[in-house]
Image (cartoon, rainbow, N blue to C red):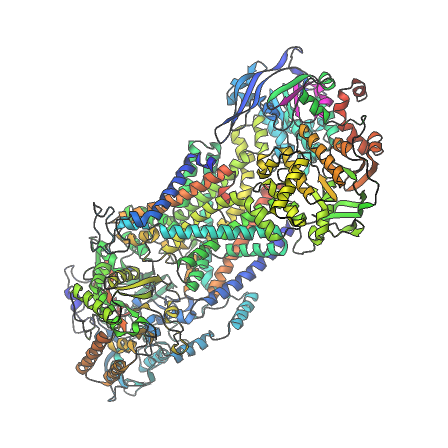
Amino acid sequence: MIALILRRGALSLVTLFLLASFIFFATEVLPGDALDVSLSADEIANMPAEVMARRKAELGLDRPILERYLGFMDGLLRFDLGRTIITRAPVGEIIAMPLRNSVALAGVTLLLALPVALAIAMAAAQAKGRALDNAVSGAAIIGYSVPEFVTGLLLIAVFAVWWPIFPATITASTDDPLSVLLAAAPLAIATTIIGSIAYLGRILRVGLIEVMAADFVERLHLSGIPRWRIIWLHALPAAMIPGLSAAALYAASLVSGVVVVEMVFAYPGIGAELVRAVTRREVHVVQAIALAAAICVVLFNLLADLGIAALDPRTRR
Amino acid sequence: MGAALRRPAALLGGLLVVIHLVVAIAAPWIAPFAPTSLLDAPLEPPGATYWLGTDDLGRDAFSRLLWGGRVAMLVAFAAGAVAVLGGALLGLAAGYRRGGFDDVVMRLVEMKLAVPTILFVAIFVTGFGQSVPVLIVAVGIIQMMGVVRTSRAAGIVLMEQGYVRAAQLNGESGPVIILRELLPNVADLLAVEFALRASSALLLVSALSFLGLGISPPTPDWGLMVEDGMALLESEPALVLAPALCIATLVLGMNLAAEGLADALGLDAARGGGG
Amino acid sequence: MRWGWMRREVAVAEPVLQVRALCIEWRGADGRANRVVDGVSFDLAAGATLGIAGESGSGKSTLARALLGHCRAGSAITGGSIHLDGDDLAALSEAELARRRGRVMAMVPQNPLASLTFHMPVGRQLEEVLRLRAGLSAAASRLRALELFDQMGLPEAERLARRYPHQLSGGQRQRVVLACAVACDPLLLVLDEPTTALDKTTEAQVLELVRRLRRARKGAMVIVTHDLNVVADICDRVLVMQHGRIVEQGPVGAVFSAPREAYTRVLLGAALRVEEASRAAPALPGPALLEVEGLGFRYARPSLLLRRAPLGPPILDGIGLSVARGEVLGVIGESGSGKTTLGGIVAGLLDGQAGALRFDGRLLPGLARQRTREQRRRIQMVFQDPLSSLNPRRRVGDAVMRPMRLFQGLDQREAARGAAALFEELGLEPALLSRFPRQLSGGQQQRVAIARAFAAQPDLLICDEITSALDASVQAQVLDHLAAMQRRQGTAMLLITHDLAVVWRMARRVVVMQGGRILESGATEAIFRNPENPYTAALLGAASRAARAGRPELAEARE
Amino acid sequence: MTALSRRALGALSLLPGLATAQGAPRRGGSISVAQCSANRFVASAQTARHPYFTVDLTTRIPYNALVWVDRQMRLQPELAISWQPASADQSVWDITLRPGVRFHDGTALRAEDVVASYELHRQRNFASGQIQKIEAMADGRVRFSLDAGNSEFPYVLAEYQNMIMPAAPVETIGNTGIGTGPFRFASTDPNRIAVYERNPDYWREGFPYLDRIELHNREGQQETALAGLRAGQFDMVMTIDPRSVRNLQRDADLVVDSGGGGHHYVIQLPKHPGSPFEDKRVRQALALGVDREAIVRLVYGEGNGWVGNDSHLVAADPNFMAMPRLPRAEAVARARALLAAAGHPNGINLGTLYWSPQSPEVGRYFQVLQETAREAGLTMALEQRPADGYVQFRTGDNDLAKGSFHRFAMTAVGPRNPGISLFRMRGDFVESGHWRGAEHDRYMALYAEAMREGDAARRREMFAAMQSLLHEEVPALLPAGTMTFSVRRRHVQGFEFHPQIWSVRFDEVWRG
């Protein structure tokens, strides 16, 4: 197990290195640099070329690409994420709070979505092929088929404008306590939960149906063990194993991949920060967020492995 | 296929997809007006001439609805095809070669998983423009990585099969084994993957259009029509609801068809759809 | 030892189980019904043991589950009755059945590893049955579980109870599921293929336990198996099934000594009879074609990062053998003996770490892709599973023509003609060339695979368990064609199998493998008639019980 | 427009808070404002309070410039009470500061603060590069020496970045967020929120009315902002899409304010060899063929937009000279005739026009442009490009010598004075499509002359002549523009929107 974790860790380092390089060069091929994109058309229209050149030199944007790349990698090795190009703000400070908020959103979503997804999957697996299953899996597919921005806008229209019981948009600050922030974000959380339930419910349902056809379930059935007991004690832990890796990746993607929800509700998370950083060519911020996202993927994978090891004694050595 | 069609949900799904496809293909002939022409009658209510009314530029909403799926479906299906073909070849090659090549491919897959989707598309679109081919490639690559994983897993299983071993023993080359022996045997899997990938590509494209990174005007497109109509939701709800319903039914149809197909083939659609 | 089921008083003569005109149908996805149990009737008296014999697909497992009132999803009892202890199981509700399962009737499922919950210690699984089905308290069920484990011949029951199924040996797992099944001393105990997953030594021990259980209890027992040797060993009566129907039934001795039906005779004909002379062709005297010296093989352990990973335990250790031109060498051993690995290394699928291979006097590189084209052509292989050895998406003609075009450079027309000729030699209609593998029967598929191997005109053919997936009736046919082909072409053969009868029939010389080593090698007749090694003797003993059951004078010697 | 809007806000002689139907202005209270413009200057951690990194809509909440431009684009005194050229060629300007102004930290405004602020601005602000030297003079006045004559220099003093901050070295000036404005920073959440509280020592006696303003940034997320407005989270949403106006006006709780002339779009017409726009007649046909009224009517709604005149001036500018208006049929006929004369009797394909969603209506704007030009025989394809990196894309390598040119593409133009706006049509700049020739030289000569001209009326004549040249030559197409809009709940009063969003003031806003 420890060997597995070490191996995973080592391979993850390779991935992270590749990723850091990919992001650097990818943002490099984009047209314009941090200074260009920080100027409006009006400004560019009126700024003399020599002023532009002078400012680029001041910001270090005129150095060769390799030199900037090595400088960046050097900083990374010393755990220094660098500073933003235009405003010289430390990158670590910029991403810390949004990262915290995104992790919190993902955590709350999973915490609330998992039990519901579990209940749905159990109901569906209990009654495979019957009306209940069809209704539940149908609802899951519909939940899966509706774009997030549609869900989000509908929730706002219904629960904030027509029947104003929840705030339409989040006016809390990035660094407010999590309790304040999450209390201001019920509709954002609801939007991510709806998608999560649909996704996790589908995975769990398929796993459960598969396990319910396993030999050990048949043996228990033929021993006269009650069905609820078979499902809860025997089938469920087994059913969760194959879906765990997929669920972990999904959880990781919740951290950085809910850009649309963050935009629609103005949730101060890492996804919107990322889009902003890309459009501003703040390479170091992009890098730092992508690395954080990658670390999330690695961590959640590791958690899934540990979870699998806990559920499946066969993987323990 | 036959078995899949006997399931009512799958049948419904297939039917939805076929209807949408037929309408999309026939749109130029059945649409009463050109989708972009300004009829100088902005915001007409639904009526005999304009079945769903006109939008604020005076374009016929019904004609735009008929045309609105064409580009999105083109992108989704083409991206699905790119994802499935590229993913299958890459995944099968990784499953066949294993070793260093496999390691590299799997690191790439992992890397893509670590790069948020939106960032990936943003870089692509910003670098290469917001045209349909660029969207197809970007969305295709995003969808591809899941296919790589599933077809690699399938490839590893197939490598144990007698016919693959016989081919190896006869000294057949890698490409021959992959194309002759492996690829035809993952066709079922790829059919399901295609349906899943195309449907999630469609969702992705609509999200991208919402963020302004996807299909762009003047192309008539449901996603854009929804976004465009939001400002007029209260007075002209049909301008939003009709295209939203079209997106939902098409994605739903593709998902139902994929589930039915997977069910009939004994495959696992939900897990295939992840990653 | 006091057995609980002594409580139940059942008149010996009165049948406990009465099955009448039972029909079970499967409804496929296409809506067509397929009758898998068709009008089966039999009686079983208390204390009696019935063997249900048949090949895979005969409906015997479906019948076994029906005896507990259970049909898998998609199937249903469509006719007849199953009277057990006065109730008709076919008519009871699911709740009523659940009340009886485990207590009145119990089942020992086919695959003990898959039939135990993998994430739960085995002790808890037995306690669960005792608590919920026998109504014992938690403490009592704990004690009773240990007692039962002890009775099942499981040593150190306390430690064992804390272990997970995958940590037990095959024999231990079989004993655990047996313990679960007899926990509430059922009236009817159904054992589904109780020995299939076990090696011969363990099989003997488990059968001994089953025999002891049978003697100790008054309830009836049904043993479902494909292995007539097992039936011969412990059953009073036998019931032979084919395609869902009963072909023949009666007392074991009577049926085995004088089978009335052709099918029974075929099944029995597959059994080993060393008394009769081997029909195998004598080896051609000649120089050694293949020489294996000091061959060793280990799998690489999953490594941390290193390409060159440390190695696992030896799979093959110091293997040395030689095959002459045109000779058939039998390699026998049970699963795990390393015989398949040996075949894989000779064929070029795997690369050994120690030792050397010589082919036609020249050093033979390890992997196929390192060998010359000519070497690849001259060494061919036929695999165990006929279906998986043919690409399901390509016509079988393609598979046979490919080596001809690859090695002999024939064009499409010539290759087609060659393939047709090969098909005829193997007794296949040339029209089958354009079929897909799934459209052929198992025997036809395996003959196509043989044709593909011979299409390269090999000098050495490696046959890895080529008959184990085939029905007994088809096995003989395939082996006959293979033998004829081999004799005509003068091809040397490495015949790898666990089936001693196949070796007896095909090979004049044999090596016996166990645990990656060669235990014994020499002339087949000499070894089979007078095995020196006790393991070889055990294998031979287990394989010839059915033959002996038909001969009372031999059967006597057993007990 | 109400009577309020016609009042010059900067004229202090008028009574503060002119009585309206709702009654007299009240002191106190707080409002929450959302803004939707895509603004690249919304700060990051360290500098969220610097005038270069605050949303320009709200620059004049904590800060003041020397000069303010009113809704009619006229100069009004702010921290400067007067300005005059100190040389005949308009290249030296003297500024007199308002006495008694204090910064938020209580220190008095001095000439040194202006000098220090402009040391930064002349390095960073695009319009301030012309400043060669800034001196604090003995009498408390400040002297600006320019590299050339600029009769419109006071407009530069009103530009959005050119706020006055307490003196400090160039590297650190402004980081404290201290200004002279009606409110001071209470807290900031970069990119998201700025909270301001009342400055009790504001130099405009009796102002501001409000105690607190909370600004929420919802760049590009108008639907979210409007949902927040309707749900009562915001009192006001600024810079909204003109076509939302129609629906918002139906809501009795809401008031929509127009700022008058706002932004418009320039379509650059490349005139390199082989380009269809080399031929003046094609350019003229395009100018005639595009139905400018249809754009205003369909994209913005009647009264919400204005017809452009192919110069960078906005219609709200007093110097703006409208083009002669032709009936649509006649315009199309003339466009077709011009095309035929240019050798394209069956119409002409102009290639791909690139556009970028710089504001929400751009897509619809160019669809109408495309469709109406088609009526006159001018066809073109439309292709969207991401806003991100668009400047570089449309400019291209732009090296005529190497054969690489800028593209047939649009970009947004903000409302500015003629001195800045008309300079954008210079031939060495891409927006003019590298206009060359005698007419161009005449245009630039007129420009240089106007910049040296002290007399406003004479300048106005020169600007008119320049616009006539553009109407004839059509170096670039500037078909139509929009008004700026904001929406507020009815209880927010005393607010006026502005064509230049950075010149919006909150001094007189109060809560009813």
Q: Position of residue C169 (x, y in %)?
A: 70, 36
Asked if residue D78 shows in the view, the reply is: no
Task: Specify whether residue C220 is painted magenta.
Answer: yes
In which quadrant will I find the C terminus of chain C? top right
Q: Residue at x 55, y 20 (%)?
A: C23
Depth check, front residue: D376 or C33: D376
Q: Relative to residue C209, is residue C445 depicted above or below?
A: below
Q: Position of residue D382 (x, y in %)?
A: 33, 62
Q: Quadrant of residue D337?
A: bottom left
Q: Which stretch did the figure color magenta?
A: C214-242
Q: Residue at x 24, y 51 (%)?
A: B54
In which quadrant will I find the N terminus of chain C? top right
How many numbered badges does the structure rendering display?
A: 0
Depth check, front residue: C144 or A126: A126
Q: Position of residue B157 (x, y in %)?
A: 60, 44
**Farthest bottom residue in view:** D88
Image-based side of C210 in relation to D464, left or right: right
Asked if residue C354 shows in the view, the reply is: yes
Q: Quadrant of residue A56?
A: bottom left
Q: Relative to residue C289, is residue C139 depicted above or below?
A: above
Q: Residue at x 21, y 61 (%)?
A: D294
Q: Quadrant of residue C62?
A: top right
Q: Relative to residue C301, is residue A57 depicted above or below?
A: below
Task: Specify whether residue C236 is painted magenta.
Answer: yes
Image-based side of B86 in relation to D173, left or right: right
Q: Position of residue A285 (x, y in %)?
A: 46, 64
